[in-house]
Amino acid sequence: MSELTVNVSKNHSNNLLRRDVRFLGNILGEVLVHQGGQELLDIVEKIRELSKSLRAVSLPEVFEEFKTLIKNLDSDNRHQVIRAFAVYFQLVNIAEQNHRIRRKRDYERSAGENVQSGTMENAVQELKNNNFTAEEVEAIFADLSLELVMTAHPTEAMRRAILDIHKRISEDVKLLDNPTLTFREREQLREKLLNEVITLWQTDELRDRKPTVLDEVRNGMYYFHETLFDVLPELYQELERSLSKHYPEHDWHVPGFLRFGSWIGGDRDGNPSVTAEVTWKTLQMQRKLAIREYQRILREMMQSLSFSTTIIDVSEELLSSIQKDRLHVTIDKIYSWNNENEPYRIKIAYMLRKLSNIGDDSKQGTTERYNDVSELLEDLKVIDKSLRHHYADYVADTYVKKMIRQVELFGFHTATLDVRQHSQEHENSLKEILANMEIVEDYSKLQEEEKIELLGKLLSDPRPITSPYFKYSESTEECLAVYRTIHKAQQEFGTNCISSYLISMTQGASDILEVMVFAKEMGLFRQLADGSVHCTLQAVPLFETIDDLHEAPRIMRQVLDLPAYRKAVAAMNDLHEIMLGYSDSNKDGGVVTANWELRLALNNITAMGQEYSIKLKFFHGRGGALGRGGMSLDRSILAQPPHTIGGGIKITEQGEVLSSRYSLQGIAYRSLEQAISALIHSATIAKTGEPAGEGNEEWEDIIRGISEVSLDKYQQLIFRDPDFMSFFKQSTPLPEVGELNIGSRPSKRKNSDRFEDLRAIPWVFAWTQSRYLLPAWYAAGTGLQHFYQNQPENMAVLQIMYKEFPFFTTLIDTLQMAIAKADLTIAREYAGMCQDDQSRARIFGLIESEFNLTRDLVLQITGQQDILDNVPVIQESVRLRNPYVDPLSYLQVQLLSELRQIREEGADDPELLREVLLTINGIAAGLRNTG
């Protein structure tokens, strides 16, 4: 395999990237010869060369030769060719990730005292330049909140075994930069990499079964173990260093504003496998991970804290703490430390013992174990003070301070677990419960206002509405079990383990109040004798569709007007979390309208919150792909109107971005550093005034008009064209995506073929695989043209908006990325699978015309010659990747056609299906996008 780079400039840094790609490509070439003979390598190289030629000059005779070569591959060679291109992309992705880390180091090495853009120091410098005082900066950090929530949506196509191999290859490739390696060491390194690539080649990329929910929990915990436990405290350390540099007169301890949460094991919407028992086991697994990490860190600390009282004096507080442990903690030889002159090691031995006793029910509530994370923090702070007592400050900063931060961030629960369920499930269960208690015969038949009145009374009434003497249906029993589990979990793991209950498809105030009634039933909401409310669980509405976004402010006013509910919010520090869905709003209304309506909802809900004197934490349900709101963390933060971040931000980190963002420490650090910098920048703008372009009513009216026309154009095809769903299913790999074992959750909410019941994830996944990327750009061109009307003065307005209106800038740049990754020439091949010639020609013609219109208008608005001229690194990466993705796309079309023909005849071919699934994995790796 030959080289592929993200930049062809001749500077030293990019030469190193080219070197790494060539190095790995040559190794893969050797593996191909070793595993399949010279013939296999020759075939792969021939396909690659023809594909590159077609991208350079599309000649009919070359195209025919290319398609004939692919069509005539025998089954064995075809299988190996697919894997060759797929593995090559995996290696290129590793090289590019390493290169990102290298580029940052190169910059830091050459910059000297200069501060790199997008770093935390750059953000602190901005605060200083804007004349913020240390006290004002401290106040800003007190209000900041960023929570990144891992999900297990079925879009992570990479097995854990493959990730482990990637990590080893990455670590080895880094060593190529070591100038001190001898010739023999380089040869050994090459042999090691050759072995790793052979292992990669011989490891099955496909799972033999769908992962269980607990498998997904383990996959999510992988990133905490591999990177996040170490990277997060390093980020805080660097932030505090930057603050101390620019505000030296102040003693800095930044509160833990950046944290990670998880849906994995808690998200039961449409996934019957997520039960109350699974949620409990998830919390136990997360606690075990935290304890193992703390034990590992303490053992490393024990090796270093060899201070002897024959030389130094430790604090009396430390000695008193050790004496207390001796009286109350039973310790055996495994944990004990026998040298009485080394008090730190003695103390750590007791700490290890107390950690190991967590989870032992017989020791719960005793001094034999840590019953609360504050007890572990107290012990660490005793050690920290004692070290500083005998001037071992550097040791305290290096070891103890870092662990204190880790314990503050991860507690005994690792990550806060969100619970999510569909609103209809709550209504169904409540209907049964209220009928059994003869409170109302059929709750579902009540009007919305009647429901709100009833639920308000139930919330204020201390009497229960369930009884252990009633036999409920299985679904209702499970619904109640979830709330019991949450209550039990908060007692066992602390209230931070679960504090948010998300309600999918929130369409009325009753959907929110139903959750609070269930919370009251299980002791998570209680009215106290003095009239106040004790509440440890918040109902979080998820507004997903365009109509729901419109209704959100009205719905929130209805619940906040109820005294009991308003008191519940007060008990949660007057903070209310609200989730906005990017996937379903896009699927419902298209990219332009979804983005515009989400912006309106943010502003309108924020204004509503101000009426009730509450802060709002917006939870942005972004996907990894462009059609689901996907973008880098920093851009997703900067895309929010600054005045809407005051109560904090939550953002989903979907399955498909986890490996690319968090499998390597250097990448995880840079991604999170940029996110923190963006958050500080937005907070600075919020304090100093609106950014340019915000609040321009004329521009907002223009976007509103573009959105209305775009929505009509989008829904005309997606919802109103009777042939569209058939075209979609036949001209994409949608039916086969469900057979890729990459998630525990079904691809449909119901056993239905209706568009409304199709999840947004496979919707976007299928369009991405077939190279249309339709959800990320369709109907944008028509909307823009409606305002432009081929009038130069209107284009001049759009061009100014692109330069000065952040919302419009982000929208146009997102369209650029989608257009760059889409390929209508290849999409036409997929369209060829549509069985109805007339509908195929008509619908594909509509799509192609809209694509060309959108591309042309984007170029005019940006003033660019080519798409992505504004980000040449990404432009070059897309341009150079495409010829390597193309063969997989053509192979996928051929394989899908053959497989579907066989299945129409009532037969099946597991090997053919396997090859289809391999192309799906390969295209996902090549495009760096799934769903």
Image: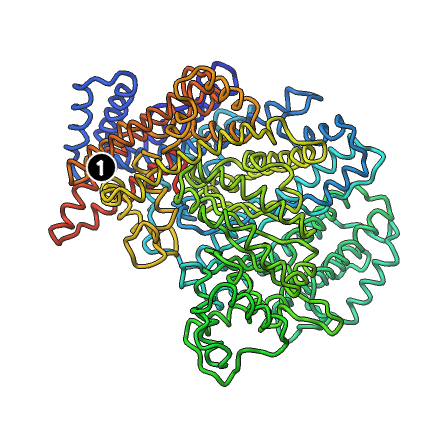
Callout 1: helix, strand or loop?
Answer: helix
Q: Which of the image's four quarters has the N terminus?
A: top left
Q: How many marks?
A: 1
Residue at position x 76%, y 58% from top? Answer: 379
Spot the residue most to the bottom.
469
Residue 241 falls in which quadrant of the image? top right
The residue that disc 1 covers is 893
Residue 17: x and y in percent read: 47, 24
Dot 1, crowdedness within 10 Å: few (<14), some or many (≥20)?
many
- Please name the colour scheme applied to the rendered image: rainbow
Measuring from the top left, give residue 910's x and y in whole percent.
Answer: 21, 50
Tell me which residue sits at (67%, 46%) in the image: 257
Q: Is residue 727 above or below residue 189?
A: below
Which of the 4 quarters of the picture holds residue 283?
bottom right
Instruction: Specify the amino acid type for callout 1.
Output: Val
The quadrant of the image that shows the C terminus is: top left
- Could you say which is closer to the camera, residue 587 or residue 185? 587
Q: Is residue 871 above or below residue 173?
A: above
Residue at x-position 60% and y-position 36%: 641
* Residue 215 versus residue 920 in the image, above or below: below
Q: Is residue 256 visible?
A: yes
Left or right: 357 as drawn, with respect to 876: right
Please give the name of the residue rendered at 82% of the width and 40% of the height, measured from the top-left corner.
Answer: 251
Residue 85: x %, y % from top left: 31, 33
Mark yes or no: residue 33 visible.
no
Question: 545 and 670: which one is in front?
Answer: 545
Task: Tell me if 374 is positioned left or right of 552 in this view.
Answer: right
